[in-house]
Image (spheres, rainbow, N blue to C red):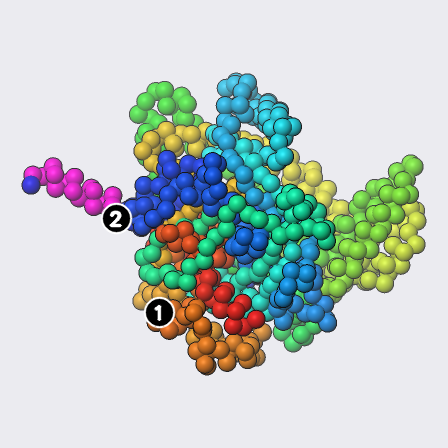
Amino acid sequence: MNIKSISTTFILIIFFRLLSVAGEGMWIPMLLEQLNEKQMKAMGMKISAEDIYSINHSSMKDAVVLFGRGCTAEIISNKGLLLTNHHCGYSSIQRHSSVEHDYLTDGFWAMSQDEELPNPGLTVTMMKEMREVTNQVLNGVTATMTEKERSQKIEENIKKIVDDFEKNSEYQAVIKPFFQGNQYYMIITETFKDIRLVGAPPSNIGKFGGDTDNWMWPRHTGDFSIFRIYVSPDGKPAEYSKKNVPYTPKYFFPISLKGVENDDFTFVFGYPARTSEYLPAPAIQLIVDKRNPAKIKLRQTRLDIFTKYSDNDPKVRIQYASKHARVSNYWKKMIGESKGIERMHGIERKKDFEKKFTEWVNSNPELKTKYGGLLAAFDSTYQAITPYIMAYDYFREAGMAVELVNFAGNFDNLINESKQKDPDQKKIDDLATQLKNTSALFYKDYYKPIDHDVMAALLDLYNKNISSDFKPEFFTTITEKYHDNYDAYTDVVFEKSIFDDKEKVNELLDNYKTKYYKKIEKDPAFRMYKDLSDLYNGHILQGLETNSHRLDSLQRIYMKAQMEMQPDHRFYPDANFTLRVTYGKVKGYSPEDAVEYRYYTTLEGIIQKEDPEIYDYVVEEKLKELYENKDYGTYAASDGTMRVGFIATNHTTGGNSGSPVLDADGYLVGVNFDRCWEGTMSDLMYDPKVCRNISLDIRYFLFIVDKFA
Ligand code: ARG
Ligand code: GLU
């Protein structure tokens, strides 16, 4: 063997190894055959790309749906049965819950189809087809256009293409940009509107581990809920009606009881919402050095106050449970993301890449004219946008995070209508009725002492961290009248405002007269809202818009340049809430020195975590009995354990919750619901060593439905 063939073998080995560990990428289903099928098969897949996405015959894509506005679900029976996460069905389950029927706590199981519960407003959207329309969308766009002219032209074209399509079709269409606006695809969809709740486990199964275990492995959450799609008797999407019948899908996922083993091929099919994998270094710097730390601190402050009050008051704990979950979810995500970028030396990586990029650009005069100023323009634009972005973050996470202020803002429309020369009485009555509903929901979960402390603490942070030209007007009052004493100011706002008082607000709304608007306008909580929104709609928005248009344009050019520079690299577009396939292998990982995580968890782990004193770790008697008796039916793994969750290298993000996790034969083996903490930077940068998606083992789902329910 000569040197040359040795080195070829070596390269082949490296290439093969890269192939077998791949996990990065969220791929367009329609392009799988062309871009991914070969690699997927090399990694173990036994089905074909055509089985996953086909427009000529039924395929898996017919069984994967966008659930509500932010999750994925899959069809698992020929009667339109849908499987998704418990946290995706949470608000529907909550809406059906009352003290008499506490489905959140106790779970809910419809024993027949007429016990299934309708959910007005909940929809499920299925993708019928996807078509590339780049040329039509960019028709008439020229290189000399300003960014504004360009986007106007594109908008015009998009409207025309969509209108033309919808005129002749029973389906809907949207056109979305891919690769930062270098490509466009039309997504053709069908939306179902009668979606009924079929089953949900009790929260101590569906949310086991709560916010404490959220984003973490080892995980033991039975994060599933079951719904069903109903259609009109002739099989078409329809609003809820008693006459509707279960939907007969073109395809549904068969379930496998075989489970997964280390190194098995899996893929995830679903609706990832947003990633930003192709940003330049200053963008990552802004996130990691400025935005995340600020938001983490603001959220931490709120969460500490929530916890202080809810720890010794069960009523408050329930009132703030959902708020806590919402605030803590991205608080924790941001911590993981920042640490992950740091561990990967992410900023240096980007800078190294940019060095190579610059060399490439400088190697050729033509490239230099096209891309020469790009990185410098990024630098200056990111510098210019930073104060606006920070002001925006504080506006949202400090100003509007005060519940009282946010709630008072709901009265803005009523005031505006009342101020008209000829107020429309019908409109005013409608607004007042709407506000009464909003108030009822608001006060049900409002605890004044928490909000009071939150306001004082957030204002203090707001003041310390934002320069005066980005501060809402009321800070002048705080300084001049209250000598920067935030507690004193907060006391007065709470004393004088009517918005912390349910009775007063109801009284106002019950006999509302247009002249009352003056009273609301003078209310100190409403004034705070007004100062904040004036600041946002004026100064902040203006700076954000100018600079972000600029960044959009730079990003589009940079994306194109990166693709030109690496013609052999397979690029995947950033997530944009369109259907994607990601594939990888079942694998444990090492989160830190000396620690190795196994790829699966079992029921035994639930028993180990049990703590009757801590809400998140309560285990039901019945589940314990099943464990004691090892009553696992056909759902046990071959080693006799009851598997609960597993992890794999699939590249997922928010929106992938509820996505089907499929094995090499296309059988359903799990339901995706989270990512491991150490890998949460994968929205910016994927690290095959630690990026793992977390799935519920499908056998645990079946075991709970069959043996527990
Ligand atoms: N981290 C998961 C996601 O981003 C689960 C969130 C819901 N669970 C929770 N404990 N907050 O959606
Ligand atoms: N829980 C997330 C969701 O609701 C998925 C977790 C992730 O971001 O990967 O979509």
Residue 545 place in picture, x, y as percent: 61, 34
What is the crowding at mark 1: few (fewer than 14 residues within 10 Å), some, or many (at least 20)? few
Q: Residue at x 50, y 27 (%)?
A: 134
Question: Does 631 appear above or below 219?
Answer: below
* Residue occupied by mark 1: 638
| Horizontal side, residue 30 vs residue 568: left or right | right
Viewer-nearest residue: 174 or 511: 174
Q: Residue at x 45, y 72 (%)?
A: 633
Question: Does 32 appear above or below 198?
Answer: above
Whether label 1 lies within 8 Å of ligand 2 gets the answer no
Regarding residue 346, the answer to whether it shows in the image is no
Alpha carbon distance from label 1 to label 2: 29 Å
Picture quarter containing residue 16?
top left
What is the crowding at mark 2: few (fewer than 14 residues within 10 Å), some, or many (at least 20)? few
Question: Does 312 appear above or below 560?
Answer: below
* Residue occupied by mark 2: 17
Q: Residue at x 48, y 57 (%)?
A: 671
| Majority secondary structure of magenta residues | helix
Residue 437 place in picture, x, y as percent: 79, 55
Q: Please name the amino acid that badge 1 sits on.
A: Ser
Viewer-nearest residue: 625 or 254: 254
User: Magenta region: which residues?
Assistant: 2-17
User: Which residue is at the far left?
Assistant: 1
Tell me the mark number nearer the camera, choosing from 1 and 2: 1
Whether label 2 lies within 8 Å of ligand 2 gets the answer no
Examine the structure image and report whether residue 11 is included in the region drawn in magenta.
Answer: yes
Viewer-nearest residue: 4 or 685: 4
Residue 300 place in picture, x, y as percent: 57, 61
For the residues labelled 1 and 2, say whether their Cβ atoms are less than 8 Å apart: no
